[in-house]
């Protein structure tokens, strides 16, 4: 019997951990050949269909999520038409909580595995191969005489270690330039009402020895990024610290590890690790979601924001760990004005990335139950990803405005292409009210029609300067200088757009060339400069003149820009070094 376990990933660089566990757990069953097939939602569906058809499988299994369920159903529906004898089995969160409804609406689906799938799929394959009754298999929904039969739910495995590692002893070359998804635990200690993890109580852990062995495989293979999918990595602080210290001790200088953490439960030991680790070794994602106390109480999320603020600020000050903080719009009791306060409070933390997400009414999540939907007046999209359209607290129009704000937040803040410009504008022209800046800039884009057309890289700089000019800001010359500084931070260029180009002269060009030939000055100015390499060094340098104290502006974001001419040396890293650009300043007056 030939079985294909497949998934449609959202991007080429993503990998699916679930189908790897299933293949590993079902491997070696007598008379059953199991193989994996990974595709992406961006691939041509006919090519996927042909690929599955050519495998000539008896059973095709698909792992289903909100991002791939519609494409998956289309593909398996067509597969049944061209290969009527194939059986289709679905699993994953998008079908686990309403298997009967899915099967009654989709005649192409023969079986559904709900919840943890390893034991259920293995038992199913053994029984169906031998022609045995399926009614005793926990977690399985199937068809019998035209009727849909849903068996009792399967309890979570007591020991996760009965599932073999899909990585130890496996080929790692398939993960080159891809993200490896990994888990050291299942379950979550919290009960957030919008999350499906709240259904399962408690946290189960893989053996720490196994975890270390698997992580060593990733490190030895030089994987670019390993993304832990543990719902709360630091649910056991001591265990988390042990894993992090192991990664630091075995650091290969290249691999990055991503974790979801609860910042308010980060203790001093974990904080110390995050403050001393190699820059780039770790990155953390912190779900804050809201600062509204009524909202947090309704969604069952207790958190100490003062502790979060302390932790995020300390880690940011150390500058070694990339921090990603999350907010969710559309939660109960969160109005537009309330969200404004949540946004500014979280923005002020100084994290590297602020993700503005929108509530999804996920199937199976407590907040998606009919009583809660009615209580809060939820209106949401009928199809995946089931995103909120409006509720009793925030209108569709207001959520649409937040969508536009979110787009500019990604373009102008999270991209890190406008760090100095936006920081200066928010601090000095908007009195640190970041939300007001993005709100007004989004309104400007909306009424100018800029959301409807594409823009070049240079155009984004021009539009921000244009907006500041339309607002009548007096510091336009300073903003232009800051924009040029940000532009040059991105990489070496031979062209600066005219609208923000600085003044140049033959005298300054000669001064710049003389500086690059003066190794004594370069050695004094730039730590680690190697004498005798000034020619190769010069190829990685751009020298720009600014008509203000750009160093003071970038360091303190002061509103007062001294009329003090200054040169900035932008030293760009060698290709693929993984290092950031370095900037050094020389006073010209």
Image: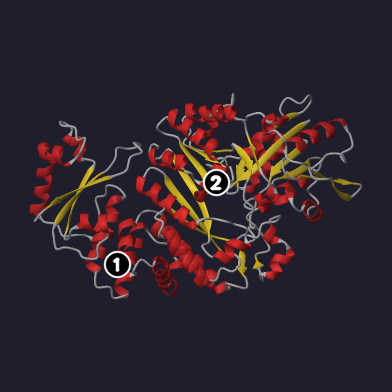
Per the image, the residue denoted by label 2 is 11
Q: Quadrant of the N terminus?
A: top right
Q: CA distance from mark 1 to mark 2?
A: 40 Å
Q: Quadrant of residue 186?
A: top right
- Crowding at dot 1, Cα within 10 Å, few <14 / some 14-19 / many 20+, comes out as some
Q: Position of residue 96 (x, y in %)?
A: 73, 49
Q: Position of residue 555 (x, y in %)?
A: 26, 54
Which residue appears at 59% of the width and 69% of the height? 333
Q: Nearer the viewer, residue 572 or 107?
A: 572
Residue 76 visible in the displayed image: yes
Q: Position of residue 484 (x, y in %)?
A: 26, 58
Which residue appears at 27% of the width and 52% of the height? 488
Residue 499 visible in the displayed image: no
Compared with residue 93, is residue 394 higher up or lower down, i.e. above or below? below
Per the image, the residue denoted by label 1 is 428
Residue 26 is marked as none
């Amino acid at each position: 019997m030939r079985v294909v376990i497949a998934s449609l990933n959202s991007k080429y660089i993503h990998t699916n951990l679930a189908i790897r566990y299933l293949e590993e757990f079902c491997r070696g069953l007598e008379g059953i050949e199991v193989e994996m097939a990974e595709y992406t939602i961006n691939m041509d569906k006919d090519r996927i269909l042909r690929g599955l058809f050519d495998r000539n499988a008896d059973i095709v299994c698909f792992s289903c999520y909100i991002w791939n369920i519609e494409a998956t159903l289309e593909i398996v529906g067509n597969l049944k038409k061209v290969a009527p004898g194939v059986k289709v089995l679905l699993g994953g969160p998008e079908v686990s909580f309403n298997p009967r409804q899915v099967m009654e609406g989709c005649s192409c689906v023969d079986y559904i595995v709900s919840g943890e799938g390893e034991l259920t799929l293995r038992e199913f394959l053994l029984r169906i191969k031998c022609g045995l009754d399926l009614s005793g298999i926990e977690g399985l929904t199937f068809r019998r005489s035209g009727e849909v039969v849903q068996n009792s739910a399967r309890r979570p495995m007591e020991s996760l270690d009965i599932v073999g590692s899909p990585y130890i002893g496996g080929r790692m070359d398939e993960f080159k330039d891809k993200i490896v998804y990994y888990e050291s635990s299942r379950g979550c200690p919290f009960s957030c009402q919008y999350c499906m993890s709240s259904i399962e109580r408690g946290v189960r852990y893989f053996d720490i020895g196994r975890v270390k062995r698997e992580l060593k495989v990733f490190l030895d293979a030089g994987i670019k990024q390993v993304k832990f999918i543990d719902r709360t990595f630091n649910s056991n602080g001591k265990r988390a610290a042990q894993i992090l210290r192991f990664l630091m001790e075995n650091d290969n200088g290249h691999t990055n590890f991503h974790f979801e953490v609860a910042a308010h439960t980060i203790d001093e030991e974990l904080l110390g690790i995050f403050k001393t680790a190699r820059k780039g070794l770790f990155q953390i994602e912190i779900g804050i979601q809201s600062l509204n106390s009524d909202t947090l109480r309704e969604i069952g999320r207790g958190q100490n924001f003062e502790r979060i603020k302390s932790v995020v600020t300390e880690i940011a000050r150390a500058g070694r760990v990339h921090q990603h903080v999350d907010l969710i719009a559309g939660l109960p009791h969160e109005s537009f004005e309330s969200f404004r306060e949540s946004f500014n409070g979280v923005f002020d933390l100084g994290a590297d990335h602020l993700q503005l997400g929108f509530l999804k009414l996920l199937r199976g999540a407590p907040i998606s139950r009919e009583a809660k939907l009615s209580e809060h007046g939820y209106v949401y999209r009928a199809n995946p990803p089931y995103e909120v359209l409006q509720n009793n607290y925030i209108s569709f129009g207001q959520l649409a405005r937040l969508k536009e704000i979110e787009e500019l937040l990604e373009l102008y803040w999270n991209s890190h292409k406008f760090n100095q410009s936006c920081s200066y504008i928010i601090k000095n022209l908007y009195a640190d009210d970041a939300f007001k800046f993005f709100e007004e800039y989004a309104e400007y884009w909306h009424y100018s029609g800029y959301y409807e057309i594409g823009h070049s890289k240079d155009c984004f700089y021009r539009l921000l300067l244009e907006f500041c000019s339309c607002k009548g800001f007096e510091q336009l010359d300073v903003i232009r200088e800051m924009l040029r500084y940000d532009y040059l931070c991105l990489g070496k260029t031979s062209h600066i757009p005219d609208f923000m180009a600085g003044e140049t002269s033959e005298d300054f060009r000669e001064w710049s060339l003389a500086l690059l030939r003066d190794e004594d000055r370069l050695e004094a100015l730039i730590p680690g400069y190697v004498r005798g390499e000034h020619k190769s060094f010069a190829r990685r340098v751009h020298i720009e003149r600014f008509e203000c104290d750009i160093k003071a502006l970038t360091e303190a974001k002061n509103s007062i820009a001294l009329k003090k001419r200054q040169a900035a040396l932008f030293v760009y890293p060698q290709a693929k070094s993984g290092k950031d650009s370095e900037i050094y300043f020389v006073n010209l007056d």
